[in-house]
Image: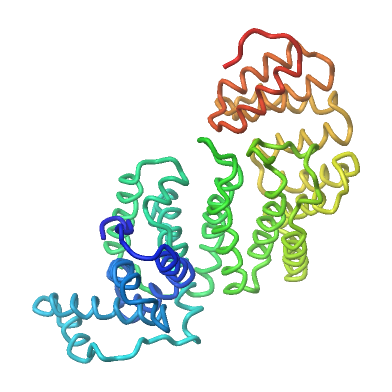
Amino acid sequence: MAGGDRPAVSGSGATRSAVEAVWRMESAHIVGTLARYTGDFTLAEDVAQEALAVALVTWPRDGVPANPAGWLLTTARRRAIDAFRRRSALDERYAAIAHETTEAEEPDWDPDRIEDDVLALIFISCHPALSREAQVALTLRVLGGLTSDEIARAFLVPTATVQARITRAKKTLAAARVPFEVPAPDERRERLPSVLSVVYLIFTEGSTASAGAALIRVDLAREAVRLARMLARLVPDDAETHGLLALLELTASRFPARLDGEGEPVLLEDQDRRRWDRSAVRRGRAALAVAGRTGGGLGAYGVQAAIAECHAVAPSVADTAWAKIVVLYDALGRLAPSPIVSLNHAVAVSMADGPAAALSLVDALVAEGSLAGTHLLPTVRGEVLTRLGRTDEAREELAAALALCRNDGERRVLQRKIVASGPAEDIH
């Protein structure tokens, strides 16, 4: 099944949904078990995909088996055994495994090994030998159970590009002879920030899409939250892992209020906070508390989660603890300095101390030039100038932001702001 694309099948739509639901929930466990069994990550992923293709054909016809995950694992293992036998003339190790294994064996589904298997998969998918794009694609494919088509739609790239990234990633891992194992504790801690950043990148794209018609790609964001929960269970002693989970839960809690009934974006100050997901808020605050108790102080994700918590508990924008948020952004700027952090700090200063205090910070970013080419800086500068009553300059900044923005929903927000700022020539 090239690229992991699901074949078209006939039969019950409910059955097909069952196949896809089982795969989405169990694919990481299945691939992890197979990789441990075969010692070959690439083969494990390939035969798991083949088992999925068989399920999509047979389950609508024969019904969903009593143990769907076990069925998929058994089918994939049979495919692996066939592959061993084909290789047996060339590789004594595969020949030995094929000789010792029979097709009648029950699935090697050891609950005590699942956590280690999934953790090994996470570190393999985010191996430093891979490019960041390949890490993201492989993580979503192997741990999220997404198809190449789904990943391509999420990141607005051709399916062939995603397939090529996954293929290159597998070849790179094979060439580097990356073992299927959880790294040693020191190496695990060294590589964990890269794993967290991949999950954060996936969520960021889902939370506010960089381009396209949808402002929020809920499925992509939800997948990142699921991965963060998985990591928090697998690495319970790492404060930043819990900080990341807290940040994603608290940010996702606002999703229900970020779009109106017609799918139009709703700005923070206009959102009906009664629609915020209070269960997600509670989960996020609980994860943040765990991060704080784990020791060593909050890291960059934890500080961002603390900022998100300030919004989550505030009854309105006006009643938000903006002074505290300014302090938190100061801390974040020391932990993880970046132009985006500086821009968000300026927004917080604008709310806490007024737009005049923020304008000099924004102008310093303009002079620095590090955010040139993005719509974020002119958007913020336009809003600050609007609050200062400098409407002509504000309109120019908002128009510049509109010209740079690639997301349709954000473009409509900018167009409304331009219209609200006063008469202007046609803006497209």
273 sits left or right of 261 in the view = right
Q: Is residue 203 above or below residue 176?
A: above
Classify 162 as above or below 8.
above
Residue at 85% across, 34% down: 351
Quarter of the image with the C terminus is top right
Q: Is residue 157 left or right of residue 215?
A: left
> For this rendering, which residue is in front, 178 or 196?
196
User: Which of 69/354 is in front?
Assistant: 69
User: Where on the picture, by quarter, is residue 397?
Assistant: top right
Q: Position of residue 423 (x, y in %)?
A: 73, 9
Dividing the picture into quadrants, the one containing residue 86 is bottom left
What residue is at 73 percent from the left and 71 percent from the top? 294
**At x 64% / y 7%, what residue is drawn?**
425
Image quadrant where one finds the N terminus: bottom left
- The location of residue 336, given as percent across then percent down, is 66, 47
Residue nearest the viewer, comparing 140 with 257: 257
Image quadrant assignment for residue 232: bottom right
